[in-house]
DNA sequence: CTCAGATGATACAAGAATGTCTCATCGGGC
DNA sequence: GCCCGATGAGACATTCTTGTATCATCTGAG
């Protein structure tokens, strides 16, 4: 089993059990604790790599949605499309990297924290552009919109985990709720 | 320092640092570890009591909003008022009991898990009634609406914690976003 | 003042998790 | 068949946390 697979196995375990010990993670992955430690020098190292994977996935979501160019263009239609793509990509993230959403250990690593802030600001700038273009309402801070999306991702993660919503409905529900809320 | 104050101090510490040890909790509260243990036999006991406090607060929110009677009445105006009150109460909860929102240890205690399910269903029934009365959209599962509110509370908690939004704006932002989303 | 109760400081044992190490075993490539 | 690398099993020391116990000190009520 390669380091990549092992990391994903660890991710699955930690998604279900965020405080799982190295023993449990190894057992769930079907390898010995020794092998786990051969691939990840320490628990901190493992968490850090998972954090990086999560940030990579987030960055890829922003890239795929092309938020920078779309935001810079100011074109409402283009921004609308980017917003849709972003929702789709973020749903995938929430499903895959769920536990990193509410993980607090990450902040300890300066590089990860810095990258997290950078992506957060990139996303926020996009929302600000969407506000200016008239796509999103202007009577809220762009920062709050970012926290809205984040929070709804957490809610979606839990809803998926508890089986309250089906995966195939996830994207529509998320996008609809972000944009229009739950009012009739 | 009474047990009540101590619990609240512990709550503050755990809000900032969800995995804080008993030593850290005691130090943050300004008491010795011995005193902390005199008030709470074990860490599990402390967490359980905080969980109970959180659930009490949640139940009180539902009670204050009078969701059962409002939902049962089917009166849209009454439901609308209840929804507003519920938002106000939940904002208070998110601020005060933030860390319990994403705490996983609680599930271990059967009584707490059961009560949590009960309140969740109470809230969901209210949303279902709100859907039937025409206040909330019907093209979403009531369960998803509950997760929406939950997720936005998590987002709000973090936004408040990071200083991204002011406490005085919290209620309006939450209610507005829940009901109408962020679209212009 | 006196004393009971609460508190702080400290020590102690038990358990869990971590990180390192060694050794035996297995399996594929040569 | 042989060997090298990866793996599993297990031992080990270390550290952290927890829960308990003991003792000195402080404080407020009587």
Image (spheres, coloured by chain):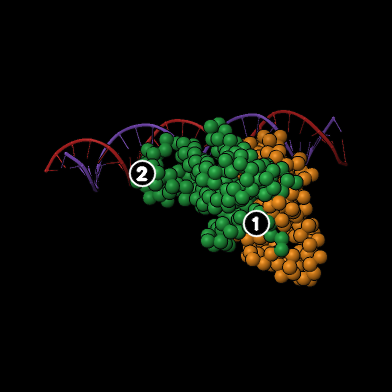
Chain colours: A green, B orange, C purple, D red
Q: Position of residue B159 (x, y in %)?
A: 68, 43
**Badge 1 and badge 2 both on one subunit:** yes
How would you rate the neighbour count of disc 1 (Cα within 10 Å): few for under 14, some for 14-19, many for 20 or more? many
Per the image, label 2 sits on a secondary structure element best described as loop
Using the rendered image of the protein, determine whether residue B112 is visible from the camera's viewpoint.
no
**Horizontal side of residue B29 vs A58, given as left or right:** right
Q: Chain of mark 2?
A: A
Marks 1 and 2, how far apart at CA: 39 Å
Q: Nearer the viewer, residue B41 or A24?
A: A24
Q: Quadrant of residue A176?
A: bottom right
Query: Which numbered disc flags the more N-terminal residue, 1 or 2?
Result: 2
Residue on which disc 1 sits: A177
Identify the residue shown where x is 68% and y is 56%. Answer: A180
Q: Chain of mark 1?
A: A
Identify the residue shown where x is 56% and y is 61%. Answer: A169
Q: Quadrant of the N terminus of chain B?
A: top right
Identify the residue shown where x is 59% and y is 43%. Answer: A70
Q: Position of residue B180 (x, y in %)?
A: 71, 56
**Horizontal side of residue B64 vs D4, given as left or right:** right
Per the image, label 1 sits on a secondary structure element best described as helix
How would you rate the neighbour count of disc 2 (Cα within 10 Å): few for under 14, some for 14-19, many for 20 or more? few
Using the rendered image of the protein, determine whether residue B133 is visible from the camera's viewpoint.
yes
Residue on which disc 2 sits: A2
Identify the disc placed on residue A84.
none
């Amino acid at each position: 089993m390669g380091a990549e697979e092992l990391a994903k196995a660890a991710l699955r375990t930690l998604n279900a059990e965020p405080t799982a010990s190295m023993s449990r993670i190894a057992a769930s992955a079907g390898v010995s604790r020794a092998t786990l430690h051969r691939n990840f020098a320490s628990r901190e190292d493992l968490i850090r790599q998972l954090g990086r994977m999560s940030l990579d996935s987030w960055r890829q979501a922003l890239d795929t949605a092309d938020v920078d160019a779309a935001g810079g263009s100011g074109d409402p239609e283009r921004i609308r499309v980017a917003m849709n793509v972003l929702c789709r990509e973020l749903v995938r993230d929430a499903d895959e990297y769920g536990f990193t959403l509410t993980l607090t250990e990450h902040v300890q690593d300066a590089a990860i924290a810095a990258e997290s802030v950078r992506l957060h600001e990139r996303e926020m700038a996009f929302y600000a552009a969407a506000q200016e273009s008239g796509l999103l309402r202007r009577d809220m801070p762009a920062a709050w919109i970012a926290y809205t999306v984040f929070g709804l991702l957490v809610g979606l993660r839990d809803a998926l985990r508890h089986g309250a919503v089906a995966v195939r409905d996830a994207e529509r529900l998320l996008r609809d709720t972000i944009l229009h809320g739950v009012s009739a």
